[in-house]
Structures are given as structure tokens and as C-alpha cells.
Amino acid sequence: MRAVTFTDGAVRLVERPAPVPGPGEVRIAVTLAGICNTDIELLRGYMGFSGIPGHEFVGVVDNAPGHPELLGRRVTAEINLGCGDCPTCRTTGPRHCPNRTTLGIAGKDGAFADYLTMPAALLHPVPDTVADAAAVFVEPLAAALEPGQQLHLRAGMSVLVLGDGKLGILCACALRRLCPAIVLAGRHEAKLAIAAGQGVAVRRADVAALRREFRPFDVVIEATGRPEGLADALDLIRPEGTIVLKTTTFATTPVNMARVVVDEITLLGSRCGDFTLATAFLRDGLVDVAPLVEATYPFDAFPEALAAAARKGAMKVLVDFTRT
């Protein structure tokens, strides 16, 4: 099969044997995959990654020993594979299993290949009404919705999303269903327009201007992708407020811990989310992800696709495994 590998900062298109499903697993023929900022960070050295990356995908089950009902189903899959035996797996699930592997990120070959294997229990069927290009967004949309699962976000709360990248836009557009007055602050007019078109209040990411117009926010979701984003969030949160951290970068993030302590601010890490919820949002048309797609490349043009995705300000770049 065709596959992409990242090794020591180099991108290679290689041929590999197609994987064989293990116990409880199925094999999926990848149809479409999305390039995530995490993939770009992996190439730069995040997690010391080496292997086949990719974790945003949709595909068709083509080999399902023990699960004939899944053959031919269009699916996506959760990305965290727990051991199933530890106290964490038995209580809260595999997402924080200390022995977990993570699709395309840590210990599990990912979706930038013609085929991948996944446990059948982690699959999520894609509704017929959801196009492949939308289904690729199930994983990032689940992550965008997660703050609403972690916090009791109420309609009257003041919520700010910092950062108008793909994740920031998804957070604002999705969480608007819980907090109608949510504000998205960013630096790019075209990106802000995508969120404004879905009913989100948008502003320029000018801390001083935001402080003049708004009272300190109850919740700030930091999704800037920049190490200094947390400092901006601290300037905009109220005492005893909550900052939700979405940014993961290879660079060190400075934190003024004195302000966190004195103002009794809660810092909440937020990573993956509920795929069932995200799938329902797409099925019911509660978020329009189509404007987030910038371009689609065939597999053989993966280096060009990666370069496009790594360009500053890029939107979602997709890789089509059905095209050469």
C-alpha cells in the first residue's frame, strides 16, 4: 500500500504491506484524510514522532473478521487506543490510559496511508447525509465541542474564543449553540467572516480593544496556536474565571503563575471530544464545515498538500486517496 512517513523531519512517500487486522480490529480503506496542525508539529519534532501520521479521516471497512456487519460501512474512528485493563480504562475510558497508543501520533500507524486498522469498538459510522469532506471533521469538531462537555456552559455566560484558525472557528460555531453571545477574536478578516456567516460575533484580536468593549470574560478558550496566546487569555479573563487551553505547540508556553494564583483562575486542558456528539452536529447541520476546506490534493501530491497546510493562515487541506 501507499503511505506517508515522517522520520527525523523528513517526509517520504513509501510502499508498505497492507496491515492485517488483529483481534477485535477491522481494516479501513482510507478515502479522505485531513492534515491537522498536530501533524505539522509532529514533523517538527513534537512527541519525537516517527511513522505514519494522520488521525482525521473517513474510509470504508474492507476487512472485518468477526464483524461482518461492518463490511462496506463508511466510518471514522476515535484516535485513543487504551489497554482496556488499567483503572483509567475501566473508569473513564481509554483517552487518558497511561499505556495508550494514539492513531497517527503515538505508537499507532495513522491515516496517511491506503489502509489502517482500528478496534471495531472505536468506529463511528458516518450518516449517509454527511459528505466525506465533512466526515473528516468529526475528530476536530469533537475537540471543539469538548469545552461544553467539560464545563457547565450556560447561555448567559460571556465566552471568548481566541484564535481564528480552524479549531477556533469550529469552537465558536459549535459552542454558539450553548452560548449564543460567544465572541471569536482573530487576525484574519476572511476567517472571521466564516464564523460571522454562522451567527458568531467576531472581533479583531486586539487585547486592549477587547478590554475596552467587553468586561472580563467568564471563559476564554485559547486556540491561537501560539505560545503567547495564554498571556493574552490571562489579560481577558475575570478573577475566578476559566481558561480552556486548546493550543499544543512544540515551543514552550510562558505562564504568569502569580496571576493565576492571585486571581484564582482555572486552567483547563482540553484535547479530544465525543465523536457521537460531533457526528450528530454534522448530521443535523448545526455546524457548516465546508467553508473551512481550502483545497484537496491527490495522495501523490502529499508533499504539496503538506506545504499548503503548513502555510501561515492556511485552512483545512484534505488528501484524497481515491485520486492519483
Image (spheres, grey):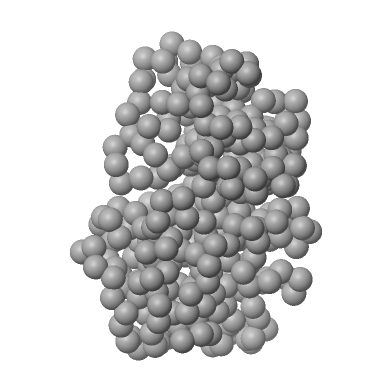
The quarter holding residue 281 reads: bottom right
Q: Position of residue 89 (x, y in %)?
A: 49, 54
Residue at (75, 53) in percent of width and height? 286
On screen, 121 above or below 147?
below
Quadrant occupied by the N terminus? bottom left
Total labels: the figure holds 0
Residue at (58, 42) in percent of width and height? 189
| In-front residue for pair 59/101 | 59
Q: Position of residue 159 (x, y in %)?
A: 64, 29
Q: Position of residue 262 (x, y in %)?
A: 43, 11
Q: Position of residue 79 (x, y in %)?
A: 49, 62
On screen, 115 above or below 153?
below
Residue at (51, 47) in percent of width and height? 165
Residue at (72, 47) in percent of width and height? 197
| In-front residue for pair 317/146 | 317
Image side of residue 68 versus residue 258, left or right:
right
The answer to whether residue 111 is visible is yes
The answer to whether residue 237 is visible is no
Q: In this view, which residue lies farthest toward the front?
A: 189
| In-front residue for pair 317/249 | 317
On screen, 45 above or below 53?
above
Q: In this view, which residue lies farthest toward the right?
A: 284
The quarter holding residue 221 reads: top right
